Amino acid sequence: MTGRLGFTGGGFDPAHFAARLRGEDISALPPYELATGPLALGAVAIHLDVAGSTRTITRIH
């Protein structure tokens, strides 16, 4: 994941997501914005064998 982690860990304020789950009209909500919080960058390296099966997964910070 790349982005601001914010409240949900998804990088955005959950207002739109929560309103949709409750069946509320989201048209009056402000536009999506990145959540405040630290910026985290990272990746994973996935090593496959010749058959395409995953052998290792390594997190890269």
Image: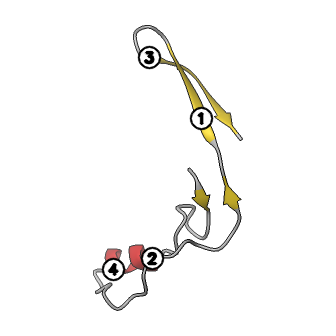
Which residue is at a point 42% across and 81% down the rendered structure image?
31
Task: Judge whether 28 appears above or below 42 on screen.
Answer: below
- Percent of width and height locating residue 53: 44, 16
Q: Which mark is residue 18?
A: none
Element type where label 1 sits in the image: strand
The alpha-carbon separation of the residues under discs 4 and 2 comes to 18 Å
Q: Which mark is residue 32?
A: 2
**Residue behind mark 4:** 22
Which residue is at a point 68% across and 60% down the rendered structure image?
39
- Percent of width and height locating residue 16: 40, 77
Which residue is at a point 45% across and 76% down the rendered structure image?
32
* Amino acid marked by disc 3: Ser
Q: Of label 3 and label 4, which has the lower sequence position?
A: 4
The alpha-carbon separation of the residues under discs 3 and 4 comes to 40 Å
Mark 3 vs mark 2, foreground winner is 2
Q: Of label 1 and label 3, which has the lower sequence position?
A: 1
Q: Of label 2 and label 1, which has the lower sequence position?
A: 2
As drawn, is 9 to the left or to the right of 38?
left
As drawn, is 24 to the left or to the right of 61?
left
Element type where label 4 sits in the image: loop
**Residue behind mark 1:** 44
**Residue behind mark 3:** 53
* Amino acid marked by disc 4: Arg
Image quarter where the C terminus lies is top right
Contact (Cβ within 8 Å) of mark 1 with mark 3? no
